[in-house]
Image: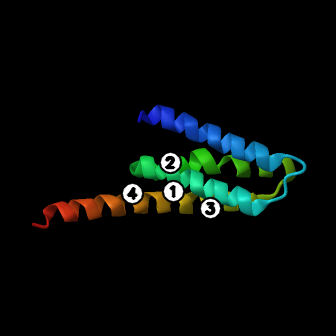
């Protein structure tokens, strides 16, 4: 897939997650964290060499809004969750690639 398209899509997903998280009646941090983790994991699975881009594109929105609106610096934890998801997606993709390469070499 085109890297620019994936980056724009990741930015849109990050903005959408942040929008839902900022709604007045939304108070489920676990679902938000899991959504960030899975989203970063999927993008990192699709393009593992750019795992850091997915971490920033998806995970940076919540800290920006959280710090700007309420001076809540604990929202930086969203970046940690995003990074874990991206690294997990990259690891799964690389593990599958390595397993496939090894199985092709075995006679």
Query: In whole angstroms, how far apart are the C-alphas of marks 1 and 4?
Result: 11 Å
x and y, in percent, of residue 79 in the image: 63, 57
Q: Nearer the viewer, residue 54 or 104?
A: 104
Q: Earlier in the sequence, mark 1 or mark 2?
A: 2
Estimate the spatial distance between the alpha carbons at disc 3 and disc 1, rounded to whole Å: 9 Å
- Which badge, 3 or 1, is on the more N-terminal residue? 3
Asked where in the image residue 82 lies, by quadrant, the reply is bottom right
- The number of discs equals 4
Image coordinates of residue 91 in percent, x first then y, are 41, 62
Kindly identify which numbered label has been placed on residue 86. Answer: 1
Identify the image quadrant of the C terminus: bottom left
Labels 1 and 4: the sequence-earlier one? 1
Q: Kindly state the secondary structure of the residue where label 3 is placed.
A: helix
- How far, Cα to Cα, is label 4 from label 3? 18 Å
Q: Are marks 3 and 1 in contact (CB under 8 Å)?
A: no
Q: Do residues under tags 4 and 3 come within 8 Å of each other at their CB atoms?
A: no
Q: Please, what secondary structure does the residue beneath circle 2 have?
A: helix
Q: Which residue is mark 2?
A: 43
Whether residue 52 is visible here, answered yes or no, is no
Residue wearing tag 3: 81
Cα separation, mark 4 vs mark 2, equals 11 Å
């Amino acid at each position: 897939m085109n890297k620019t398209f994936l980056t724009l899509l990741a930015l849109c997903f990050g903005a959408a997650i942040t929008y839902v998280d900022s709604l007045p009646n939304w108070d489920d941090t676990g679902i938000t964290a899991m959504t960030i983790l899975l989203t970063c994991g999927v993008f990192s699975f699709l393009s593992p060499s750019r795992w850091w881009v997915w971490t920033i594109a998806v995970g940076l929105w919540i800290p920006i809004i959280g710090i700007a609106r309420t001076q809540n610096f604990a929202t930086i934890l969203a970046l940690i969750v995003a990074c874990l998801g991206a690294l997990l997606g990259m690891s799964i993709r690389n593990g599958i690639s390595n397993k496939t390469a090894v199985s092709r070499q075995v006679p």
